[in-house]
Image (cartoon, rainbow, N blue to C red):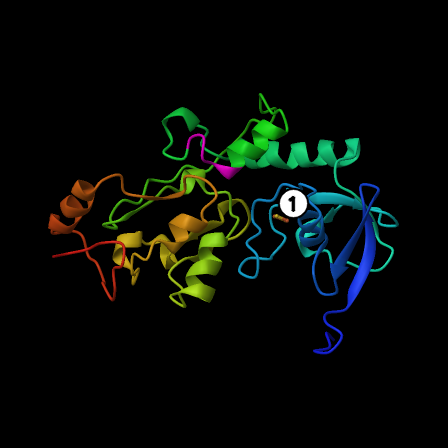
Amino acid sequence: KPSAFFGPKKVRLEIDGQLVEAEVGTTVLDAAREAGIHIPSLCYLREINEIGACRVCLVEVEGQRALQASCVYPVAEGLKVRTHSPRVRKARRRVVELILSDHQRECTTCIRNLNCELQNIAEDLGIRRIEFQGESRRQPIKDNNPSIRHDLNKCVHCRRCESICAKVQENHVIAAQERGFDTIIAPAFNADMGDVACIMCGQCVLACPVGALTEKESIDDVWKALADPTTHVVVQAAPSIQVT
Ligand code: FES
């Protein structure tokens, strides 16, 4: 336990041959970033979403047969970690290819083009084509919310939106529904974001690493949606929309 007098307890570990000091209770990803060593991550949001879901941050830990998700692997004294070995890069690439195989890849027309975490990771890994072909999920775009557009076809199941909505906003509007291949991160019963108690704070949009949750392009869209009699909005507070 950290002592107020001596400060937090530290351990020393080796990451890519570099000796690194890290606080007990932190993760290999934290320690690497602190030391300026880049490990890509997708689902990780510090203290908000630490669920080790996407496996993009895989690393090799000496003594462990399987590769480990660095965002949930605690630091320990004497740990030896490799973050960019050929084995790690190959596995990481496969993980990203699998995520992309079920992602609607209309990047050039996506509002997040050139500002997309998944696109950046794929670019860094030099991914040019996806070998995996097969069934993919297709869902209608949910567009009933006055300020947020929800496109499940681009969702990567990182659950950052779910965590931020629940833990930061305490609103619990979005959560995982269904199971396995049919899993979606959406309001209960796959309801439209405009038909639930969304307060339009925009936190889920900020947390989304891809173009699954986006802000509507212009205030005109917002007014159009508000004027639509079929739009049902439960407004408690709408900091993103100034109505005067
Ligand atoms: Fe570590 Fe997703 S960032 S598993």
Taking depth in this image into account, of 122 and 95 the one nearest to the observer is: 122
Q: Is residue 204 left or right of residue 77?
A: left
Among the 4 quarters of the image, the one containing residue 129 = top right
Amino acid type, label 1:
Arg
Give the magenta-colored segment's residue range: 113-117
Circle 1 crowding by C-alpha within 10 Å: few under 14, some 14–19, many from 20: many
- The answer to whether the beta carbon of the residue marked 1 is less than 8 Å from any atom of ligand 1 is yes
- Residue at left offset 58%, top offset 34%: 121
- Report which residue position mark 1 lands on: 55
- Residue at left offset 37%, top offset 41%: 151
Q: Quadrant of the C terminus?
A: bottom left
Whether residue 207 is visible to the viewer of this picture, yes or no, is yes
Taking depth in this image into account, of 239 and 171 the one nearest to the observer is: 239
Whether residue 178 is visible to the viewer of this picture, yes or no, is no
Query: In the image, residue 174 lies at what x, y percent?
Result: 41, 57
SS state under label 1: loop
Query: In the image, residue 242 lies at what x, y percent?
Result: 19, 55
Query: In the image, residue 74 lies at what x, y percent?
Result: 74, 59
Where 106 falls versus 12 (above or below)? above
Q: Quadrant of the N terminus?
A: bottom right
> Magenta stretch: residue 155 in it?
no
